[in-house]
């Protein structure tokens, strides 16, 4: 199978596409891939590191109101469609899969116009502008949440889950613990703010670092995000020595292995993260980003909260003390932790990538 993948801007669009690639490779080791993204997006760094050929088109996102910039964006869109057609004719894919972000708009649209089978995947409960636009042209729409089915053309929409759920099922707990230097006798709490980090979460964690030393049987993995790492490191040096039960990291590239070893997660509520933790049954403290379109992270998180799989703290309510109380409540109450784990597992869709592969084969 020859596959073009496209999607970008944030890890939430990129990592599901890479999870699809890994599943296709597991099923068909001779499969060939091309990833088309933006040279300015995070995908330009992440995709080549994954060993997948990468090409770029120039494109910008539409504003939500009429502006002169939108006229320029439309011009860039049609130029990107032409460039995408050239790449597609050269690569000759059997199927094109888009995972969201404005860069996948011209690529998937160009594929549809060329008669190449197309699939888009929507990670969030509420669809983004690009996927809403593309839904009328593609052959199939794969969604992560049942609530999304009514927001797309019903005849072509399929509930698959998020392919990152399958990716983490191949994580290795021993490899994760070895990477962190943490023995099997310690519980692991993973704290991070998404692929770029989150200032509010960093500030809350920073405020309680000295108090985390009291959890002697727990190791805390604090992932700051690349852009925040130096500032957080400097702030911690001012506080004194970092407690021995805390690992400070800018980024984690082997996240499936680390998640396989994780006891409790503190994070944003991106769709890929929620797919990962429900596949593994990890109880979570979720702090949804208020800066995303349609407030979709809070909608994602509330579904887990309603099911009893997570606790939600809104960013405007987040303080170091509130986070410490929530952590203490989960780490000290084994019965509550078990109940949340079981609720999380019931929501999980660990075969999501396999379902998307079957959808690709059907086309």
Image (tube, helix red, strand yellow):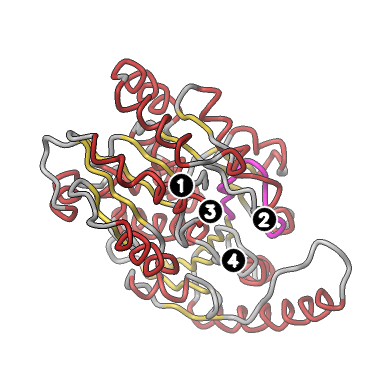
Q: Position of residue 117 (x, y in %)?
A: 58, 60
Q: Earlier in the sequence, mark 2 or mark 1?
A: 2
What's the CA distance linking mark 3 and mark 2?
19 Å
Given this view, does label 3 or label 1 mark the residue nearer the observer?
Answer: 1
Q: Which residue is mark 4?
A: 116
Q: Residues within 10 Å of mark 1 (few under 14, many from 20)?
A: some
Residue under pointer 3: 363
What residue does disc 2 label? 131
Vertical arrangement, residue 105 with respect to residue 192, above or below: below
Of pointers 3 and 1, the one earlier in the residue sequence: 1
Report the Cα–Cα distance between label 1 and label 4.
Answer: 48 Å
Whichever of labels 3 and 2 marks the residue nearer the N terminus, that label is: 2
- What residue do we see at 29% from left, 40% from top? 212
Rendered position, 356 above or below 326:
below
Q: Earlier in the sequence, mark 3 or mark 4?
A: 4
Mark 2 to mark 1 CA distance (whole Å) = 34 Å
Name the residue nearer the viewer: 233 or 224.
233
Q: Which disc number belongs to residue 204? A: 1
Image location (x, y in percent) of residue 274: 46, 40
Q: Are marks 1 and 4 in contact (CB under 8 Å)?
A: no
Residue range in magenta is 120-131
CA–CA distance in space, label 3 to label 4:
9 Å
């Amino acid at each position: 199978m020859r596959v073009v993948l496209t999607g970008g801007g944030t890890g939430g669009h990129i990592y599901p596409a890479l999870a699809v690639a890994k599943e296709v490779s597991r099923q068909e080791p001779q499969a060939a891939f091309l990833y088309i993204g933006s040279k300015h997006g995070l995908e330009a760094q992440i995709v080549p590191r994954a060993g997948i050929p990468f090409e770029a088109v120039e494109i910008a996102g539409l504003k939500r109101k009429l502006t002169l910039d939108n006229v320029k964006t439309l011009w860039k869109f049609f130029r990107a469609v032409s460039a995408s057609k050239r790449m597609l004719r050269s690569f000759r894919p059997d199927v094109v899969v888009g995972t969201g972000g404005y860069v996948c708009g011209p690529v998937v649209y160009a594929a549809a116009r060329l008669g190449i089978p197309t699939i888009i995947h929507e990670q969030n409960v509420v669809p983004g502008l690009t996927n809403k636009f593309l839904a009328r042209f593609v052959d199939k729409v794969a969604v992560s949440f049942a609530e999304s089915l009514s927001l797309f053309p019903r005849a072509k929409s399929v509930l698959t889950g998020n392919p990152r759920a399958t990716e983490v099922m191949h994580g290795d707990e021993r490899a994760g613990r070895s990477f962190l230097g943490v023995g099997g006798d310690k519980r692991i709490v993973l704290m991070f703010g998404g692929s770029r980090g989150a200032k509010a979460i960093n500030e809350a964690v920073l405020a309680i670092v000295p108090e985390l030393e009291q959890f002697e049987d727990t190791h805390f993995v604090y992932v700051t995000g690349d852009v925040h790492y130096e500032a957080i490191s400097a702030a911690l040096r001012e506080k004194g020595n970092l407690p021995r039960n805390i690992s400070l990291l800018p980024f984690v590239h082997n996240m499936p292995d680390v998640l396989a070893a994780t006891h409790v997660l503190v994070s944003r509520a991106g769709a890929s993260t929620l797919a990962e933790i429900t596949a593994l049954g990890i109880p979570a403290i979720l702090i949804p980003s208020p800066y995303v379109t349609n407030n979709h992270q809070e909608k994602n998180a509330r579904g887990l909260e309603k099911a009893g799989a997570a606790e939600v703290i809104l960013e405007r309510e987040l303080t170091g003390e509130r986070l410490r109380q929530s952590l203490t409540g989960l780490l000290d109450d084994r019965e509550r932790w078990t109940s949340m784990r079981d609720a999380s597992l019931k929501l999980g869709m660990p075969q999501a990538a396999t379902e998307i592969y079957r959808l690709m084969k059907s086309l």
